[in-house]
Amino acid sequence: MAIYYYDGQATGADNGGSGNDAWQDLQGAFNGISAGDTLYLKKQPSRIGSNGTDANMTVNIASSSGVQTHIIGYGSTPGDGVRFETSDGISVSTDFVFMANIDLLITANKPRNINFASDGGLLYNCVQDVAYTFGTGMKVTDSAALRCWCRSTPGQNGNSAYQVDRGQLIDCYGELVGSGGGSPYAVTSSVGYRSCRIQGCTFIDKRTSAHNSSVGIYIDGFVNSYGPNTVNGNTILDFGGNGIQFDGGIDVGDNYTVTVSRNLVYNCGGYAFAISGAGNSRNNGIHLVDNAVGSCTSGETDGNFSHYTNGVLLTNGVNPLTDYAPNTTSGGGALISGTYGFPDVTDPNSATRKQFGSYGAHSAEPGGGGSVATVGFAI
């Protein structure tokens, strides 16, 4: 369980053993670590990588059950929280990886992204900005992303900022930008034999042209797990289609639930909540509870849900970006007015805190404890 370093500007022995002797090749650094090691990636004077190649760095080392491997970006001192900047995609297929402080910018038409498939792993404080049309979203599989930020420039149906398969997004931000058409999503999520959770996130369609039939959160799959599948406490704004949409083939029976609660869905061109077409007859495990909806053209729900007990309907033009914020207090819940507990969610580099007004549609959710038990990281 050694500590290693990467620094492309280092001039020492190139063995990763210290800051002076850091590895100078990124893929070589990934290849040099073992389960349980810590690898610090030093931010370079300019972003590394080339948008003209198909470079995808890979982390694929032999896993050891319960032994966590750390890959962490830094600026001048390990632990300073500064993000390591790259244009090369990073694909992780090793279990129990904690990867933090990575900033990926893609400006050319190349199939690269952060692809995090780390069973029991956590992606923290990472940024992905896909500044070209048809970009691939940040992908999280069998793992969790906490306080990450992703921008997508969609150009066709199915493009998305995030893809979450049997994983978790906690306190993340995603936006769609540009002028492309199609019917993209902020998030696509497949539920399955493991619990899936999207909680405390903000998703916005900020495209300059017509928003077409864009969707905030799109969910499909077959729910055959007793684990908690929840979409809780998210803010979903300005999508041309539905706010939260279930695929018509989704199969959720009475014993296996997907709970959609305490979300704020505002200014969508379709329904706040919908099931594609008539939907599978086994959708009675989908529960809509205590959500707030405003200015959705088609209304709250398309009527294909069996359990529907939403709360207040917002009709007076409240602006969620000034009146609401994800609640980051210990034991808190979905949406609460007051001081935002970390920097402006729409700007990953902001050092300011935001003060929000009071509207009162939501209050702190009782219980909880303010931690994500699955990943063991306090929020």
Image (cartoon, rainbow, N blue to C red):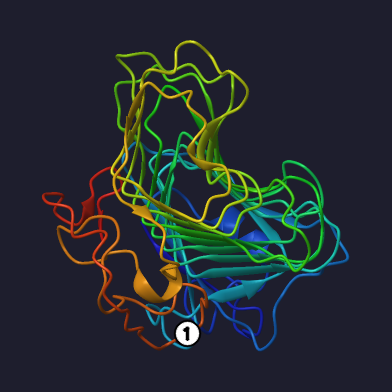
Q: Residue 194 occupies which quadrant of the picture?
A: top left
For residue 120, above or below residue 209 = above
The x, y position of residue 29, in whole percent, is 59, 62
- 81 shown above or below 161: below
Q: Which residue, given by chain and number where applicable, does mark 1 sit on?
A: 350
Nearest the eye: 308 or 125: 308
* Vertical placement of residue 235 versus 214, above or below: below
* Nearest to the observer: residue 9 or residue 129: 129
How many numbered discs?
A: 1
Q: Residues within 10 Å of mark 1 (few under 14, many from 20)?
A: few
Identify the residue at image location x=42%, y=85%: 77
Point out the residue furthest to the top here.
281
257 with respect to 246 (left or right): left
Where does the image place residue 312, in percent across and percent down from the top left? 30, 50
SS of the residue at dot 1? loop
Q: Is residue 241 left or right of residue 173?
A: right
Circle 1: residue type: Ser
Q: Quadrant of the C terminus?
A: bottom left
Residue name at image x 41 percent, y 68 percent:
318
Q: In this image, 3 relative to 6: left or right? A: left
- Name the quadrant of the N terminus: bottom left
Give how far across and how far down residue 190 sits, in percent. Answer: 53, 31
In the rendering, at what x and y percent does residue 236 appear? Answer: 49, 55
